[in-house]
Amino acid sequence: MKTEIEQDIAKLNSGEMEWIDYLRKYNRHTLKISLINERTGQEEFDGKSITFLNEDNAISHLALCSKFLELLCEEDNTNWGYKHTSADLVNRVVTPIVDRLNGSCPI
């Protein structure tokens, strides 16, 4: 007897199942950003999660989010979020992200 995935692959090959339906069922990758209290180990803020139907797409988004967090936490970039935030600081954080979004810098 065929397993469920084998049956679905046969349906996919015969045209009974759409590729997108197969991806929704078997190729889901979720990127989640949350806040965890290191003292208690509890997640205190649900944050945001997004599910992708392609692992490469999920990895690219994870790399972009990771780079953004790294840039925000660099010592020279920690004084953001104030009315007196300098344009130089904003550019140090935003320009590398823009470069990645427009493809001029690899993720």
Image (cartoon, grey):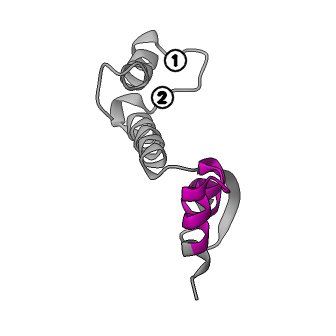
Drawn side of residue 76 relative to residue 83, left or right: left
At a point 31% along the width and 19% down the height, the residue shown is: 104
Name the spot of residue 32 as percent of width and height, x first.
Answer: 58, 55
Name the spot of residue 91 as percent of width and height, x first.
Answer: 41, 15
**Callout 2–callout 1 Cβ contact below 8 Å:** yes
Q: Secondary structure at mark 1?
A: loop
Q: Which mark is residue 50?
A: none
- Residue tagged by mark 1? 85
Q: Nearer the viewer, residue 77 or 48?
A: 48
The reply to whether the magenta stretch includes residue 9 is yes
At a point 46% along the width and 46% down the height, the residue shown is: 62
**Amino acid on which disc 2 is placed:** Asn
Where are the magenta residues, as a range? Answer: 7-33
Counting labels gives 2
**Amino acid on which disc 1 is placed:** Thr
- Residue tagged by mark 2? 79
Name the spot of residue 79 as percent of width and height, x first.
Answer: 48, 28
Q: Secondary structure at mark 2?
A: loop
Drawn side of residue 100 relative to residue 42, left or right: left
Determine if residue 40 is in view: no
Q: Nearer the viewer, residue 58 or 20?
A: 20
Does 25 appear above or below 105? below
Drawn side of residue 21 relative to residue 88, left or right: right
Q: Quadrant for residue 37, please give it.
A: bottom right
Query: Marks 2 and 1, Cα distance to the nearest angstrom?
Result: 7 Å
At a point 60% along the width and 73% down the height, the residue shown is: 7
Determine if residue 22 is in view: yes
